[in-house]
Image (cartoon, rainbow, N blue to C red):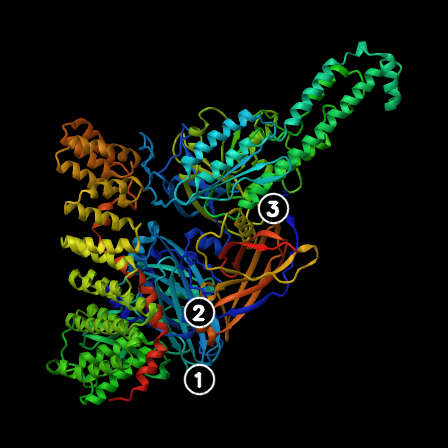
Amino acid sequence: MPPFERRSGRTGAAALALALAAPPLAAQDDRGDLARFFEAIDVRVVELEVVVLDRDGLPVAGLGRDDFEVAADGRPVPISHFAAHSETGPASAPPPSAGEQAAPEAAAVEPLEPVTWLVFVDPTRLRAARRNAVLGEVGEFLAGALGPGDRSLVASFDGHGLRLASRLSDDPHAALDALDAVARSPVALSTLDEQSAGLRREINAADPLSINVTADKEQIRRDDVDGLELRGGTRALAASLLRQIEALGELEAQRTRAALEALGGLLALASGLEGRIGLLLVGAGYDSNVVDNLYRLWDSRFSELDLRSRAGLLGAREHEVAEAYARLLATLPASRTTIFTIATGEAAGLDVVDVAGAGTALGAGSAAAAASSEGRATLAGLADATGGRTFAAGPDLGARLEAALEQLLTYYAIGVALDEQPTGPIRFEVRVRGEGRRAVHRTRRAFTGAEDQAAAAAISQLLGSAAAGESSLAVEVGAPGERLRGGEQVVPVTLSVPLAALTLSPDREVHRGALGYYLAVERPDGTIVRLEPRRLDFDVPNAQLQAALAESVAFRLELALPPGASRLGVAVLDRASGQRWTRAVRVEVDAPR
Amino acid sequence: MSGALGRRLAIAAIAAITAAASANASASPPLPLRPLPGPRATTALLLARGGEGGSLPLAVTLLPLDARAPRRVLAIAEVEGRALAAAASDGRLGVELHLYAVAADGAIVASRSEALAIDLARHGDRLEAGVLRWVAQLELGPGAHVVRVHVREHFSEGFAQRQVLLAPAGGEAAAGGLFLASPASPSLALPALSPTVGVDERELLALLGGGPDPLPRLAGGASAELRIATPTDRPAPERLLLLDPLGRTVAELATRVAAPGGVAAGVRLDALELDLPPLSGRFLLAPGSPAAGAQPSPVALTFEGAPPTGAPEALAAPPDDARELRAAWRAAWLRFAAGEREQAIATLMALESGLPPRRAAERLAASEGVLLDRLRRRAPADLLPLALLYLDLERAWLAEGRFVAARRARKVAESLAESLAAAARGERQRELAAGLLEALAAGHLEARDAESAARLLGRAAELVPGRAEPWLALGILHERDRRLERAAAAFDRALAAAPDLREARLRRARVGLLAGERDALAELERLAETAADWVAVVAAQERARGYLAQGEHAEAAAYLAPLVERRPEEPSLALARAYALERAGRRAEARALAAGAAWSPPTAESAPRKRYADTPARALGARRAEVERAALLALGTLAQRIEEDPLP
């Protein structure tokens, strides 16, 4: 499944109506924590989520605002608000040692935010036995990690694109069943191993001194190979093997790029989720040149032949893979997901290159990513860029993953107010008081506006299995109408938000409001289509304000949907306050007779 | 309800800015404000409709700086800090501040919406001892305007709205303002300056000094000092008028310029001295003659400390004729229904104070009583705003130390609430009536009158049986009075409405334990295991107490061991285990544990038993904002009901 397909759906006659039948207000919509309250008002208030680890790598709780110093792009910035989040309370802070100042008063402990666990399995170059052992450990971890309100989802790269093995669910069994399903699936890239092994055998078997000249001549005639004075048959064989290696390399590079795009697609899908988001990435990493060993073997046999003019240089193919990785890294500063990688196989790593717009972000990709000659560097780079960490596969992985859980549960939300509206990513540095402690956090933050966040939230609604929770947003789906060419049918949809939940601006005799509508459709074939956003400006006369408070602002649109079960993800944004409401609904269209 | 809160309500229309400029050095730096695009629709409606109300004590004054249009006007709003701090969620406040200027034709010609966050860990002490002071600047045209200020706390939804009339500009019209000097500390205000306030105006505010005193209290019979802002081309007024709440002149007071003041933003600040007559009560101070420089915002004063040596003739008793008295009461109610809550309260107090003591009850019955009965019969469903008026009147009387009058006002409020409850039809009306009864019950709880609170809570719970809070509160009251069966029944009702309400589960288990119910221990264990809140701590302590009561000290210590490990931040758990260890003869372990518990940093959750012992007043007050909002919106209907009834 391709990650996204931007397509303009048919949204026909959209009309505003103040619907007379209004749903009751859900008071919860009006609530939120202080950070959200102010971030909705002004993006200059930035919240950093910081985990403090002690010498042993264990999260430290119980610290206060004065334990931290924050710098933005190298300049100290004041902490505007501070909250400590912890499952176990703030007491794991050790008492001050001799010579250390008394610890400042600890902050009150905030209630835990729900955690969403995403599992992404990239089976590229994984052997089934190893993959399944890791998945078993991950399943064991998830079964214990999901607390009240937590949810999980399992996805994989199926060799072509992103595949959701389960929907977001608070039922641990859904995730376990999905992990089982992934474990049962054939290893998608087993052909790589087979083809590599075959080519290795052929290269090893090719003895330049024992080639049959007659057969070589025939081969040379067929392949139109020049320069036959000596060992022409060898040259032909070498050229043939080289072409096979290059074809295999191209295929694998395409797959690696697709795997990176699939991971990026999952991160984009998750970007509109609320609460803490942890992504467990099971894979071997991303290698720009998985056939490098074959090249080296080929070189050892046929180095005298001048067939590989680009040996030792970074080729276009490798560059494309590195670019795809860099692009993914560049999206992470704006992501709220913390990536925990589980290095399950061997990956040679790749050289990270600069690409337009991503060069600064790559710096945040950390030294680990830059030191790509080491295996797992790409995985470590993803983890580092999001303040996560990398785990090695092993028999006690399930227990060691507890550290990831701790990290998502025990953290500090530190709000800083910037002097001016950020125009690009900002590099943050958080220092924490106390010997042996270190602060782990997303070192670079990029900022997305309320509209982008609403668009992401609409797509994230499609990750769920059903219309979730209470919302003041009502979505009414009418009976499918006109049948279009290609079998699509026009479905009327009405989106209603109670006026009482909206922020209005006074302007003499009226109050003005503005709403933005963001929709995404998951079609029956799994394709996700993002529709063009719509905007609705409306006025309410002051004299009618009281009557209107009992009503809703309704927006009607028409969607052209193919036969089958589609799902509609909706986010409505109050453009004045930045508040948004979301919902997902299922829409059925019958097949044409 | 605190006395200070009531006092501040009493003069909500006017704020006096006090203290010498020299004291400004200790004033707090302004809190950063963030612009809002506008208010929520529900708040917008209240601002557009007008009227005064809400549960937060708020004072607003206007300081026009120009005599002719366009006029720069400073709007100064002060919210009582203690009430605001009580609305905090986890030590934080999110405060929205909205201002509408409405022209005579009803058009909203200027508006401003801003918000700020207050971290009580940093500003709590200062806030609780003083006020949050918001200053915004407007530019208005020549006509008359009503300026409305609405303050809303984001998490609790507690709010207050006040409105001040600004007279038209031009001619002899006013500029400047009158400010009472008082010994209030300038450090007792958290200032929040809107970005709309210009540089010159900031200078003026600095000249005025730091902290405002929302309650100018002066000693009758003594000299007082006040400051006046007048246009630079006009002299300071030579005379000021002292008015009673009914607008009648009580005295003319000569002024002396004690010290000419500085000039900023086009006005001059002078310090005036004057001698106050030996009175006690509430008064307004207004300029003595327009020629001396009109004074748009008279200062409300409360004289105290002087014996009531006899009121001047102008302050004589209200009309003796019963019908005239009824007309006066009706006028006060209409004033309230027109949105002038504070003036209405001051008027009612003046009327009642003026009644001859021996005949007061009879006169009240013949005037207010008659009107109340008629209204109760004709429009019982429209009594909500009036009930809240009398609730505020009670606070105002309490602030004056007039406890008998306060009790009478409360009785009126409760009788109106009962009438409202009896007439309530439909879910919405029942919820509002129940909310009003809960607010009244919260007042009884503050006064430690559990019996009266229980009576009102029982009535509220009957009205809306699906709500857990009144049953929980009722159960707590019974539990505190050791009426275990009734407590258990109330907690059962709370749990029927909200099965996961952990506090109700805890209290039900504890009551059950006291009554010898065997499954209570298992429930306590479940509560101790399943969360990390204050309920879990108390549940663990109670469970351990069960072991200790049986002499099973080692078992108590063993039971608490994993909990102490899991909740090391809770010194109370460690100390409970240390106690059990000590009783079990393991003294060294006990000492070590107790010593280790001592350094645990204090947190908001560090006093679970205090939480357990708290009255449920705060939970009951949660619906007050909703009731206040509904009352504000019902003022128009109340006015209609009062007006359509011919004066008997």
Report the Cα–Cα distance between label 3 and label 1. Answer: 75 Å
Is residue B361 shown left or right of residue A500?
A: left
Q: Is residue A282 visible?
A: no
Q: Amino acid at mark 3?
A: Gly
Above or below for B588 versus B528? above
Is residue B630 shown left or right of residue A346?
A: left
Residue of label 1: B171
| Residue B370 in picture, x, y percent from top left | 21, 83
Q: Chain of mark 2?
A: A
Q: Secondary structure at mark 3?
A: loop
Q: Is residue A111 visible?
A: yes
Residue of label 2: A550
Residue of label 3: A526
| Residue A358 in picture, x, y percent from top left | 63, 40
Above or below for B580 versus B633? above
Q: Quadrant location of residue A412?
A: top left
Q: Amino acid at mark 2?
A: Ala
Q: Nearer the viewer, residue A492 or B183?
A: A492
